[in-house]
Image (cartoon, rainbow, N blue to C red):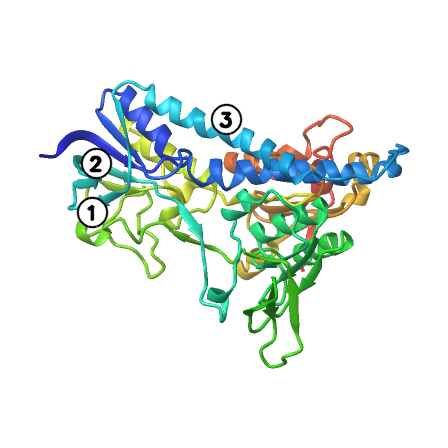
Amino acid sequence: MATRYDAIVIGTGQAGPSLAVRFARAGMTTAIIERNRFGGTCVNTGCIPTKTLVASARAAHVARRGGDYGITITGSISVNMQQVKERKDAVVRLSNQGVENWLRNSGNLTVYEGHARFEGRQRVRVGEEQLEADRIFINVGGRAAVPSLRGLDQVSYLTNSTMMDVDFLPEHLIVIGGSYVGLEFAQMYRRFGSNVTVVEMGPRLIPREDADVSEAVKAILEREGITIRLGAECIAFHKRGINVAVEVDCASGDKTLTGSHALLAVGRVPNTHDLGLADAGIAVDQRGYIQVDDQLRTNVAGVYALGDCNGRGAFTHTAYNDYEIVAANLLDGDQRRVSQRITAYALYIDPPLGRAGMTEAEVRESGRRALMGKRPMTRVGRAVEKGETEGFMKVLVDAETKELLGASLLGIECDEVVHSILDLMYAKAPYTVLQQAVHIHPTVTELIPTMLGELQPLQ
């Protein structure tokens, strides 16, 4: 006989725990199910561990640059990868255990550990137990995509998840994929001391970004000694002794890279293949993403999908916003929607890229009249003072409404600076509000008003 609940939440990523606790506190009997590690990708193999590793890599980088600041460091700078991993593990453990303890200590909430599978529209099996609820919320996240590349099954390779187990320094890391995840690991391990080559099938890195951003990022990475191989039309693998060889041009056999390790960073896929969604009649698209409407409802009444598995966002902050949308609509009598969300994310190389709204290419494609401001970080006092002047800031404005359309900020602290623009975009206020604001000196953000005072028509 099935155990009855008011709500069942499948998965403990960024949306699931907050939603389950909110329901429980509202007096609803709630079950939450986790089959692996509490906290999902962000806590265990994504944001938290990778940014902890990025911090260690930056410390090594800054130490090596001590002479630029008049600091003499005697002896060579060495990196103890076992200690780096131990520090990362400690930070992850704090978050992982925090999520688990929070859930287990919340009243009116039952935690199940095991694999959940639908056995009907309102029924889920976990091991030997059956659970039923009128409302079921799927928050199962995603994992690294493993494409069908020739010879891949003959070699060992790493993904963003298995990289978390690495406690040694790869002699030569070949990163397959020149986008966000791949580039963060590439710079990180170069700073730890590995030789690094990035292989990208496309004509430029991070193709989602404007060409000037892609070129600037490429230049930053190359200056640190990372080899970038673009236009890899055909990628194949084979063993070469204890190493891995990667063919990057199948039309020419001599174009082969040899490295000690290979990292696959070519995208993500949702964890929806083994949930029994067909048994519940829940629709997915051709890539396996659960199809949802603007309020995250699936085609099956009472079933919702949140986070990476719904294809409506691929970030921790969008997953958490999914929770906010569902909670507001079901518990607060609100009418929040996914379409109200403004695109925003960051690329955590150093210096970071902060993005909000439309790219320059998207603005041009829209055909609207627009203004653009652009400023190199060499003309930002704070960046000069810190000796970190790589990158630039770019902002786009609608010429008629004067509302901000988007920004690409590549430079020191720009992952934080971008929020001054993002907040104004949510307020739908004219750019002149920000242009006339008085910001603290010396900061990076203080140059945003200056840049807005130098807008030119987008040609």
Looking at the rendered image, the quarter that the C terminus falls into is bottom right
Residue nearer the viewer, 365 or 299:
299
Which label belongs to residue 135?
A: 2
Residue nearer the viewer, 374 or 91:
91
Q: Which residue is mark 1?
A: 300
How packed is label 2: few (under 14 Cα within 10 Å), some, or many (20 or more)? some
Amino acid carrying mark 1 in the image? Val
Which secondary structure, mark 2?
strand
Residue nearer the viewer, 367 or 8:
8
Residue occupying the point 22% across, 24% down: 28
Tell which circle, 3 or 1, labels the residue nearer the N-terminal end: 3
Tell which circle, 2 or 1, labels the residue nearer the N-terminal end: 2
Q: Which residue is mark 3?
A: 94
Mark in front: 3 vs 2: 3
Asked if one can make out residue 14 in the rendered structure from this viewpoint, the answer is: yes
Mark 3 vs mark 1, CA separation in Å: 37 Å
Mark 3 vs mark 2, CA separation in Å: 31 Å
Residue occupying the point 25% across, 30% down: 31
Q: Is residue 281 left or right of residue 255?
A: left
Q: Is residue 363 left or right of residue 444?
A: left
Looking at the rendered image, the quarter that the N terminus falls into is top left
Report which quarter residue 86 is drawn in: top right
Mark in front: 3 vs 1: 3
Q: Is residue 331 left or right of residue 95?
A: left
Q: Is residue 185 left or right of residue 32?
A: right
Mark 2 vs mark 1, CA separation in Å: 10 Å
Amino acid carrying mark 2 in the image? Arg
